Amino acid sequence: MRLWLWSLLTTLLLAGCDGGNRQLAQESLLYCIEGTPLTFNPQLVTSTETLDATAHQLYDRLLDITPDSQYPIPSLATEWERSDDGLRYRFTLRPDVTFHHTGWFSPGRPLTADDVVFTFSRLIDPQHPYHAVSGGRYPFFDSIGWPELVREVRALSEHEVEFVLSRPNASFLTNLATDYAVILSAEYGAQLLAAGHPERIDQQPVGTGPFMLKLYRPDEFIRYHRHPDYWRGSARLAQLVFDITPTSSKRLAKLLTGECDVMAHPATSQLSVIKQHPELALSYATGMNVAVLALNTQKAPFDDIRVRKALSLALSRTDILQAVYFDIGALAESLLPPVSWGHDAKLLMPQPDQGRARWLLTQAGLSNGFDMTLLVPSGARTYNPDSLKTGQLIQRRLAELGIRVKLLSLEEQILRRELLAGNQDAVLTGWSADTPDPDNMLRNLLSCQAIAAGTNASRWCHPLFEQQLELALTEPQLTRRIGYYQQAQQLAYQDMAVIPLVHSQRLQAFRKEVKGLRLLPYSSVAFHRAYKE
């Protein structure tokens, strides 16, 4: 066991003898996660581990999304107004919001409009001194066309900032509420630039969130301390520790022994154990997500729609739902789940039909099958708890058609490089939306721009699909927006752009003394309101 953890357990054992230690144990929470964050800036990645570890612990956004009405609500911005032509948005910032005071930075002022300008100009301006730092890629913002949409971000006064758009965009406000739209410190950025270490802005983070980074040991743990001057009110937890434990069985063992208070991504096979344990509890949330099999539509033989349809007919999604998800989820008939206001209930995936699948392959000149490599991400994802097992089920079904599938499990960074290169045959992937807006999922999974961002793994690019997305963004009436999104889904369905598999439920296991946790269908995990009884 790690030395730091022994030290912490010793503290807990001494709690009965020392009131101060008892209070420390009561105000500390250990969260068992499966993977190491790739960065401490969520703008740079789409990794679940990074978002969970950073987005709502270290940072805030201009807006939040209310879980009930699913509309944007104030956060760092207290109010906003939109011009009549839809091209200008003016935000009034909350006064006296303090940045973290850390061992590497002492803020000289509270949040101002300069911080908002610095944050978003980095994303859109190639000449910005921080644009190319840490690789110069911003996958979420690149995939939604943010650099083309936002022409300028400018400070009007100390607490007023204006965004100037190139065209009206109905998803603009919800995109400002995503986990990726965090606000960084311009003052900290200037200090690092002057010192010649701009890359540290993404490695030694400074935000306005409820916790601040105290210590990070890669592949071991992240220790956060509460931000004492947090504008929403100081967190009840004095210390939050992310314990990095890749194996699900080990995370469960730590939860059972009390070594961890909360466990991320419990395996569905473990749910019966958790439910039967008197000291443990489970929380569920209907997922705004989808797991898909993405075939590279720019590469033979997957550029042939007959092959894509043959593979969709060969798969048993019911087997995947039962064996991988243990029926904790729903079969995906299209990309958007029923919880989405853009869901098209008329779309239904066909039932498995090996005979018709074989006939389609014969028509495509592939009656003897072919060889292919299926990339699978290592570790669990919110939309797929076990990609390797899913891949094995697909491998078995396709073997009946003479299709020989090689499975290749890759870590997140390596997988992302492969997808950017675009040479893959197929990949098990998906998307967990962090806003209720259909654009968030459809654009990131299937838009032409998302190919270069690495989130469109099928590399499918259809001008009519793009047109429907753009019409939906410029349409103010919700009923018409729904119609455009449904037409976009129908196009993807007819062309079998990806093969939808399952909509999962978000799961979280925790000890019953932990209170204040709430899972949402979108957004990463947050601990600001968590406490222990």
Image: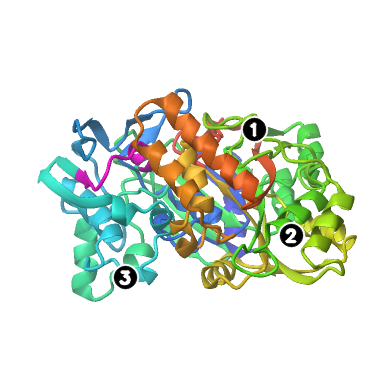
Closer-to-camera residue (335/130): 335
In whole angstroms, how far apart are the C-alphas of marks 1 and 2? 40 Å
Residue 438 placement (x, y as % from top left): 49, 38
Q: Find residue 474 and name its label.
A: none
Q: Mark 3 falls on what kind of element?
A: loop
Residue with the mark numbered 1: 283
Residue 509 lies, with reference to residue 180, above or below; the image says above
**495 lies left or right of 388:** left
State the residue lying farthest toward the bottom: 196
Residue with the mark numbered 3: 132
Residue 78 visible: yes
Image quarter of residue 133: bottom left
Residue 526 visible: no
What segment carries the magenta color?
163-175
Q: Earlier in the sequence, mark 3 or mark 1?
A: 3
Q: Earlier in the sequence, mark 2 or mark 3?
A: 3
Which of labels 2 and 3 is toward the front?
2
Q: Please report the residue visible at 82 percent of the width from the left and 47 percent of the height from the top.
A: 316
Residue 401 placement (x, y as % from top left): 87, 61
Residue type for callout 1: Ser
Residue 399 lies, with reference to residue 463, above or below; the image says below
Q: Quadrant of the N terminus?
A: bottom right
Q: Earlier in the sequence, mark 1 or mark 2?
A: 1
Residue type for callout 2: Val
Which of labels 3 and 1 is toward the front?
3
Residue type for callout 3: Ala
**86 lies left or right of 160:** right
Closer-to-camera residue (98/472): 472
Q: Residues within 10 Å of mark 1 (few under 14, many from 20)?
A: few
Q: Find residue 307 and name its label.
A: 2
**334 lies left or right of 359:** left
